[in-house]
Amino acid sequence: MQRPAADLSPMTMRQPSFYIPHGGGPCFFMDDPAGTWTGMEAFLRSLPERLPERPRAILIVSGHWETDGFRFSASPRPPLIFDYYNFPPHTYALTWPAPGDPALAERAAGLLRAAGHPAATDPDRGIDHGVFVPLKVAFPDADVPVVEMSLDHGLDPVIAYRVGRALRPLRDEGVLVIGAGMSFHNLRAYRDDRATEPSLAFDDWLAGAVEGDAAGREERLGGWADAPAARFAHPREEHLLPLMVAAGASDGPGSRIYGELVMDTMISGFRFD
C-alpha cells in the first residue's frame, strides 16, 4: 500500500532546518581504523534527538544533483544512485528503502513556481549518496518519506537562499528541510595539514555569517566568495549551496551545532530555528 502524503495538521510542530556534512562517499559504512568519521557519524546519528517531533517527511537538497531550474524527486519508491567510485564492493549493495512522497514533491515545486522560480517534479529520479549516506545514519529505519531537491546549475547563492525562503511553509507542515554538502570541499586539500589554517579562517567567517542577525543573512551568505580562503575552501560551490537553501528556509537564528577537524580541515554543521 502506498504511504499517504504528509499530514498537514495545524497541530504539527515547526521543524528546524539543517545544513549537514554528508561525509566522503560511503565512509560511514566502511572500516575506519583511524576514526576519521566517528565524530561526524555521531553527529548525524543525533539529528532525530534535535527535532521537536518525528518529521512527517524530509526535503533534502544535495550538492550532487544539478539541473536547469529546480527539480524534486517524485518517485514513490526512489532507488539509490551509487554515484561514488572505487570503493569496496559491499558499498554498492547498501540499502535504504525510504519511501518517496510525490505529493510533497509537487507541493514544493508549486511553492517555488509561485515565487517565480522554475521548478518541476521528476518521477524517475532516485536519491544520490549525498542523501542516502547521511540519512541512513540519521534515520536507519528508513521510515520517513524523503524528497530530494536539485540545485540550479547556475549555482547562484542568492537564488538558492530565496528558494529556501519559498520553502519555509513546509516547516510548519512537519517537513524537515536539510541541505547536505560539506562546509569545506577541496578534494586536493584533504589530508594536507597546510589546509588547516585556511579552512579554519573560512569556517570562522561562515559561522559568523550564519549566527549573525537573521535580517542580514542573505546578504552575508550571498557574498560568500569574498570570505577569507573562500575559493580555497570551495573551488566550486555546489557543496556549499545547500547551506543557502537551509538558511533561507528560516527567518530565525542560526547556530553552529557541529564542528570538527576532518582530514586536516574544519567541517561544520548548522541549525536554523
Image (tube, grey):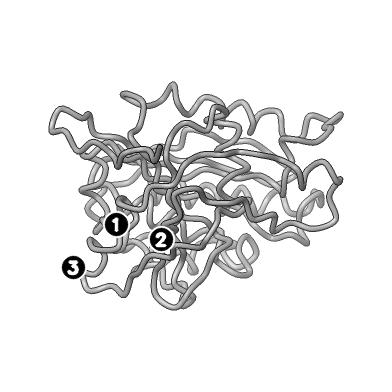
Nearer to the camera, 146 or 130: 146
Q: CA distance from mark 1 to mark 2?
A: 8 Å
Q: In this rendering, would 251 be left or right of 243?
A: left
The three-letter code of the residue at mark 3 reads: Ala
Residues at discs 1 and 2 in contact (Cβ within 8 Å): yes
Pinpoint residue 139: horizontal percent, then vertical percent. 52, 30
- Of label 1 and label 2, which has the lower sequence position? 2
Task: Report the residue marked by disc 2.
Answer: 72
Q: Is residue 46 above or below residue 7?
A: above
Pinpoint residue 255: horizontal percent, then vertical percent. 39, 37
Q: In this rendering, would 249 be left or right of 146?
A: left
Q: CA distance from mark 2 to mark 3?
A: 15 Å
The C terminus, quarter of image: top left
The three-letter code of the residue at mark 2 reads: Phe
Q: Residues within 10 Å of mark 3 (few under 14, many from 20)?
A: few
Q: In this rendering, would 109 be left or right of 39?
A: left
Pinpoint residue 76: horizontal percent, then vertical percent. 44, 49
Q: Secondary structure at mark 2?
A: strand
> Splitting the image into 4 quarters, where does residue 45 fall?
top right
Nearer to the camera, 179 or 141: 141
